[in-house]
Image (cartoon, rainbow, N blue to C red):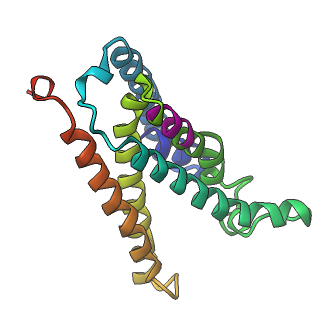
Amino acid sequence: MLYSFVIYSFGVHFNNLFLLYCLILGCSLYLFILYISYVNRMDVKQWFDENIPVKTIGGYFFLIAVIFYFLWLSDILPAVINDTIPGSVMEYDLPVNPVHVMDLAVALPALVITAILLIKKNQMGYILTPVLLVFTILLTIALAAMIISLQIKKMMIDGSIAGFFVIPALFSSTLLILFLRRMKRSVAM
């Protein structure tokens, strides 16, 4: 919610839902802060047994970050080098692409930092891993739905790329299940 409503609040042309976007953004931000501060006081690491696939999940987070860094930088760097504006920015008539901003400044570093923390079996890695797995599930499903919607409206020629986003959604779901199955029974109940 936080990610999406930052984009809606800053990246969508002003409309009659603007105040609602701001309200949801504020609530999402403060609820996330409260969640992290509350859960961080608990010994979350002890909720799990030792068999969590930390290297697999950490490697997956690195892979997702690298793919999206490559994707966004392939749009941004040529524009920076040629002193032009990226096509994705011109297409939506915005000052910048808010997805680029949120991904480059927040989401992708969060994936990398969480990967490192999880591999090192740090408390915050255990807290953020399910959050980021759910985030990747929802984001990839939303991207697939957006592409399908554009295809239906004939605003996009090839809708087959939507299938690409189903793969990380399924893989993230599998990793989330594996992660949560490693919870000790006494905690899960």
* Magenta run includes residue 154: no
Q: How many marks?
A: 0
In this rendered view, identify the residue nearer to me: 85 or 12.
85
Horizontal side of residue 108 vs 47, given as left or right = right
Can residue 13 be seen by looking at this rendering? no
The image quarter in which residue 170 lies: bottom left
Bounds of the magenta segment: 112-118
Q: Is residue 137 above or below residue 36?
A: below
Give above or below for 47 relative to 7.
above
Above or below, 44 against 75 in this view is: above
x, y percentage for residue 70? 66, 62
Q: Is residue 36 left or right of residue 115?
A: left
The structure residue drawn at horizontal position 46% and vertical position 53%, both measured from the top left corner, is 60
Q: Residue 148, image x and y in percent?
A: 39, 76
Residue 113 placement: quadrant:
top right
Q: For the C terminus, give its image quadrant.
A: top left
Taking 157 as reference, is 171 left or right? left
**Residue drawn at 39 percent across, 41 percent down:** 54
**Which residue is at the front of the view, 31 or 23?**
31
